[in-house]
């Protein structure tokens, strides 16, 4: 019964992400796009607010007793044991600049475990999703749906790693980790956070790392990475993966966790399973 309930919610999540993505695309690269600033200085647009409102309406219609947590609107407490975690546009800075790497992120929790997730990239026509026990999947820009699998590269010296820009490391006092990573891997590269995670989850990069997240920034990847035969944890191997996050196949995850923690990484726990 729980599996059926999960698959029903995954179906709604996929539909809601697509519809919210269509709304965003109606304003993408448009001169009609108005940008406001939040209290912390980050940008927000009508596509952020209206996209989340659209997703919330779809959830309320299908599962009125479920809770909802989102970036742009107050949290709704549910009574069913299910909670949805929404980021209507991850990468708003990219969106307002007309860069196509922004995404719609939806996670579905059951009793505190993130059991389904969708990451949809409307300007790139790609979607990555997973459900607990149902595998991870990637709809490519060619319209093909294939299993999402992480890279099997396990040597950092051969790795392409998705990572924040150097100024971000410096801004948050992570100079040591920046030096350790750049001296250990073949190359670092980064788009916005969600697309960086999607590149690693589909094997187009060998790993992804970042820091300073909210739950809605990483929710889908908490289930996508384990279902894609990988690990998604904090840098030291612990959970939750929000203050820091590292996603990779098992061998690469172990190697990079040691690099990031100076060899003091915790025993890995088989992937993120909740908050």
Image: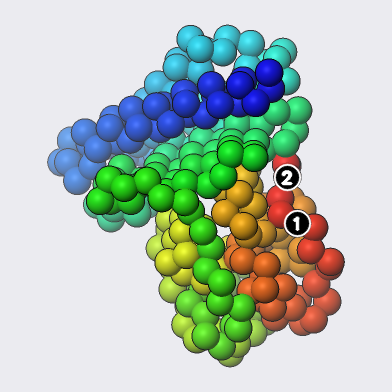
Q: Is residue 180 left or right of residue 36?
A: right
The residue shown at (47%, 46%) is 137
Q: Position of residue 150 (x, y in %)?
A: 53, 63
Give left or right: position of 40 versus 139.
right
Residue 204: quadrant of the picture: bottom left
Of residue 178 and residue 270, the one placed in the foreground of this image is 270
- Residues marked 1 and 2 touching at CB (< 8 Å): yes
Residue 27 location, x and y as percent? 22, 36
Q: Is residue 124 above or below residue 150?
A: above
Q: Which residue is mark 2?
A: 273
Residue at 28% over, 51% down:
141
Instruction: Name the residue at 59% across, 83% down.
Output: 156
Q: Secondary structure at mark 1?
A: loop
Question: Which image quarter: residue 63?
Answer: top right
| Residue marked by disc 1 | 270
The percent position of residue 101, horizontal first and vertical second, equals 34, 54
Q: Residue at x 61, y 78 (%)?
A: 154
């Amino acid at each position: 019964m729980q599996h059926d309930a999960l698959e029903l919610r995954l179906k709604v999540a996929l539909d809601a992400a697509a519809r919210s993505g269509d709304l965003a695309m109606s304003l993408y690269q448009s001169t009609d796009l108005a940008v406001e600033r939040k209290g912390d200085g980050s940008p927000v647009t009508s596509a952020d607010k209206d996209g989340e409102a659209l997703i919330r309406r779809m959830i309320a219609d299908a599962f009125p007793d479920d809770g909802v947590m989102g970036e742009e609107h107050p949290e709704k407490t549910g009574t069913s044991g299910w909670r949805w975690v929404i980021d209507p546009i991850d990468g708003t800075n990219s969106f307002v600049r007309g860069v196509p790497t922004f995404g719609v992120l939806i996670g579905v929790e059951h009793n505190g475990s993130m059991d389904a997730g969708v990451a949809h990239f409307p300007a790139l026509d790609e979607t990555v999703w997973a459900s607990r026990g149902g595998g991870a999947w990637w709809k490519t820009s060619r319209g093909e749906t294939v299993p999402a699998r992480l890279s099997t590269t396990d040597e950092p010296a051969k790795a392409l790693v998705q990572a924040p820009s150097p100024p971000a490391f410096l801004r948050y006092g992570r100079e040591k980790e920046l030096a350790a990573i750049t001296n250990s891997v073949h190359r670092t590269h980064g788009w916005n956070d969600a697309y960086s995670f999607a590149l690693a989850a589909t094997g187009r990069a060998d790993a992804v790392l970042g820091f300073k997240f909210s739950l809605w920034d990483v929710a889908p990847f908490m289930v996508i990475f384990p279902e894609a035969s990988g690990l998604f944890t904090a840098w030291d191997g612990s959970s939750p993966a929000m203050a820091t996050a590292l996603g990779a196949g098992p061998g690469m995850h172990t190697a990079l966790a040691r690099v990031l923690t100076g060899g003091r990484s915790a025993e890995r726990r088989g992937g993120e399973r909740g908050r």
